[in-house]
């Protein structure tokens, strides 16, 4: 067995008893606890931030899609200039390998009027190709609407916010009024279900219904829509795919002469995604602080262990052992302490993430954070990278205090044994 490793194991694993009890055990416990807490905080922080970003991002995408295609004249208005969707355009979009599916929809600003109250809404009309997965997840009452390709349904989904403001319930009907060229056009809808995504910016304005209503209100043809929602396989490819689609459609027009305009979800919601981007800076700050605290704890522990073993170091030097060899002994001891702390840190972090994902003990205000509890998203790659980085940095930081061994003189250190 390697001599340095053998001696390090004797120092770390051998326990003193009785009158020979040293100060090392409490120092070791403090150092291990520092590493464990620091690593647990780092893993939990990354899991929470990644989970938070993913939850908020998925809610925005659930309403708006990864990429939207509209008329160049529409900008961000809900009263959009219509575009014509033909088979050639759909095939051109789906031919891109990164695109998973497309949906069409139309929006129209209106007012819901009850006997006692009224509330402005945006009716989002969807077609038979609408994927209900997102809204089903957040449906709190009633059932999903069914969009038939031929017949028109009067059923709609409204948010819990709107239902509470207007004191409406599932199964009840209400009148909505829409303005077209100074002409008010009423429609009567029945509430099929009530959803609550916790994303107040969308919940307070959107009602989901049949796109055929908006086409009739606006006098559009059956192939006219406000926008095309484009969903992609991998969010990391968003910018590349947006550019590809933009340049592939920049010189094309529909039969009405409208120029196509491609925008990503980041461009449609810059404030939200800039805010989410700031969270990455917070994570790096937390990681840096935890590593610094853990390293200083370990440095203190190593220095005390070295000072406690001063006489042993003197004897080893007197027997001809080199400074480099003795330093390797204490670096091995540091490795044992760091890995022990990392083991417990991983256990603590995994337990926290499991309990939080299962029981949602830590709550958030949906009006501020768009979600009602602290989310966690833990990947094995993140754990591996954090552990590898922490181990490497911690061991590197142990090199400097190990130089204290070179200052110990055998004659003086053995004299005080």
Image (cartoon, helix red, strand yellow):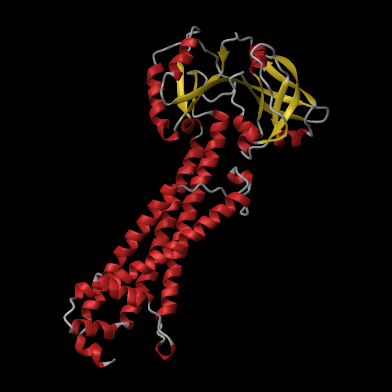
Residue 258, position as x, y percentages in the image = 48, 12
Instruction: Confirm whether residue 401 shows in the render.
Output: no
Q: What residue do we see at 27% from left, 73% from top?
A: 329
Q: Nearer the viewer, residue 15 or 158?
A: 15
Q: Nearer the viewer, residue 219 or 89?
A: 89
Q: Is residue 332 left or right of residue 293?
A: left
Q: What residue do we see at 50% from left, 57% from top?
A: 349
Residue 94, position as x, y percentages in the image = 45, 19
Q: What residue do we see at 67% from left, 13% from top?
A: 217
The quadrant of the rendering that contains the N terminus is bottom left
Q: What residue do we see at 20% from left, 89% from top?
A: 411
Residue 370, position as x, y percentages in the image = 60, 42
Instruction: Confirm whether residue 214 shows in the render.
Output: yes
Q: Is residue 8 left or right of residue 226?
A: left
Q: Dividing the picture into quarters, in which one does residue 323 lie? A: bottom left
Residue 297, position as x, y percentages in the image = 40, 70
Q: How many marks?
A: 0
Q: Is residue 249 above or below residue 324?
A: above
Extreme residue in the left direction:
320
Extreme residue in the front direction:
1
Q: Nearer the viewer, residue 21 or 356?
A: 21
């Amino acid at each position: 067995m390697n001599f340095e490793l053998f001696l390090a194991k004797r120092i770390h694993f051998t326990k003193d008893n009785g009158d020979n009890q040293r100060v090392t055990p409490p120092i070791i416990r403090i150092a291990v606890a520092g590493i464990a807490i620091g690593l647990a905080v780092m893993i939990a922080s990354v899991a929470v931030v990644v989970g938070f970003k993913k939850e908020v991002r998925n809610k925005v995408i659930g309403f708006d899609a990864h990429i939207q295609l509209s008329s160049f004249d529409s900008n961000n208005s809900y009263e959009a200039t219509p575009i014509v969707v033909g088979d050639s355009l759909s095939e051109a979009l789906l031919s891109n390998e990164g695109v998973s599916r497309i949906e069409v929809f139309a929006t129209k600003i209106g007012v819901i009027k009850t006997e006692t109250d009224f509330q402005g809404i945006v009716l989002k009309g969807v077609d038979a190709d609408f994927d209900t997965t997102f809204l089903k997840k957040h449906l709190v009452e009633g059932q999903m609407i069914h969009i038939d390709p031929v017949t028109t349904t009067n059923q709609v989904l409204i948010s819990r916010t709107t239902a509470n403001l207007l004191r409406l319930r599932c199964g009840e009907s209400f009148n909505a009024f829409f303005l077209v060229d100074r002409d008010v056009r009423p429609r009567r809808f029945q509430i099929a279900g009530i959803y609550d995504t916790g994303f107040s910016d969308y919940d307070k304005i959107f009602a989901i219904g049949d796109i055929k209503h908006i086409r009739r209100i606006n006098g559009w043809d059956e192939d006219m829509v406000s926008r095309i929602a484009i969903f992609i396989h991998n969010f990391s490819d968003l910018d590349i795919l947006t550019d590809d689609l933009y340049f592939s459609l920049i010189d094309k027009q529909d039969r009405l002469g409208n120029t196509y305009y491609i925008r990503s979800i980041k461009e449609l919601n810059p404030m939200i995604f800039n805010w989410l981007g700031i969270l990455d800076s917070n994570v790096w700050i937390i990681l840096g602080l935890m590593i610094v605290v853990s390293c200083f704890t370990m440095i203190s522990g190593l220095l005390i262990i070295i000072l406690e073993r001063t006489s042993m170091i003197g004897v080893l030097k007197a027997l001809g052992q080199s400074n480099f060899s003795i330093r390797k002994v204490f670096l091995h001891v540091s490795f044992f302490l760091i890995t022990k702390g990392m083991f417990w840190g991983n256990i603590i972090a995994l337990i926290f993430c499991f309990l939080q994902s299962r029981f949602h003990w830590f709550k958030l205000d949906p009006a501020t954070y768009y979600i009602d509890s602290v989310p966690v998203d833990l990947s094995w790659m993140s754990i591996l990278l954090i552990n590898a980085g922490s181990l490497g940095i911690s061991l590197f930081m142990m090199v400097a205090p190990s130089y204290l061994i070179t200052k110990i003189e055998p004659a003086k250190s053995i004299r005080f044994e």
